[in-house]
């Protein structure tokens, strides 16, 4: 059984692979600041997406995206504003959520759902 941190890293790696296959470029991983952490910052075309990755075994207790609460969204917005203040960019920012469902953890297939513009 994997610990929570290892499982989180596994989920983020699955999400990063998924996004790269869809021609997103990984700008930064695990940006940490006083407001919290942004799992992935990616770009494609004119978009810069701040991505929250949520890993679950299944959706029996709700969709993974439902765990991106209003408070979490506030923290992500604040962290993104800080990142943008430190990195000048002409790209249009948005917030995405990538749900990673791994019923057997690292030992089995995963299902990934990418929700673009998940919140404002």
Image (cartoon, helix red, strand yellow):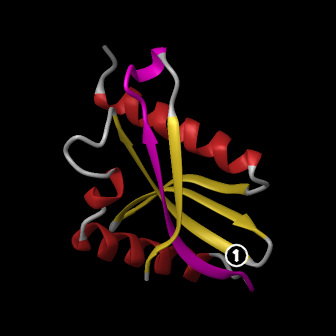
Question: Hey, which residue is sitting farthest left in the picture?
Answer: 61
- Residue 59 within the segment the image draws in magenta: no
Residue 24, above or below 86: above
- Which secondary structure lies at badge 1? strand
Q: Is residue 79 left or right of residue 22?
A: left
In the rendered image, residue 36, in percent from the top left (x then y), is placed at 34, 61
At 60% across and 79% down in the image, what residue appears?
A: 93
Q: Give whichever of 79, 108 is nearer the camera.
A: 108
The location of residue 112, given as percent across then percent down, is 52, 43
Residue 81 versus residue 32 in the image, above or below = below
> For the point 34% across and 19% down, which residue is it?
2
Quarter placement of the C terminus: bottom left
Check disc 1 and report the residue beneath it: 47
Does 19 sit above or below residue 11? Answer: below
Q: Which residues are magenta?
A: 90-107
Residue 104 in the magenta stretch? The answer is yes
Q: Is residue 54 left or right of residue 110?
A: left
Depth check: give the residue in front, 25 or 96. 96
Residue 76, given in percent of the width and then of the height, sits at: 39, 70
Give above or below for 118 relative to 81: above
Q: Position of residue 86 (x, y in %)?
A: 59, 77
Q: Residue furthest front?
A: 60
Residue drawn 80% across the image and 72% down it: 45
Give the residue drawn at x 57%, y 36%: 14
Mark 1 neighbour density, 10 Å: few (under 14) some (14–19) many (20 or more): some
């Amino acid at each position: 059984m994997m610990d929570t941190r290892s499982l989180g890293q596994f989920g983020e790696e699955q999400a990063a692979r998924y996004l790269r296959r869809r021609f997103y470029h990984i700008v930064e991983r695990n940006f940490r600041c006083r407001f919290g952490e942004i799992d992935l910052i990616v770009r494609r075309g004119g978009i810069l997406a701040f991505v929250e990755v949520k890993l679950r075994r299944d959706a029996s207790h709700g969709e993974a995206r439902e765990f991106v609460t209003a408070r979490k969204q506030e923290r992500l917005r604040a962290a993104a504003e800080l990142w943008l203040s430190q990195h000048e960019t002409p790209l249009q920012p948005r917030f995405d959520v990538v749900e990673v469902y791994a019923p057997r953890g690292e030992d089995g297939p995963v299902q990934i759902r990418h929700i673009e513009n998940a919140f404002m």
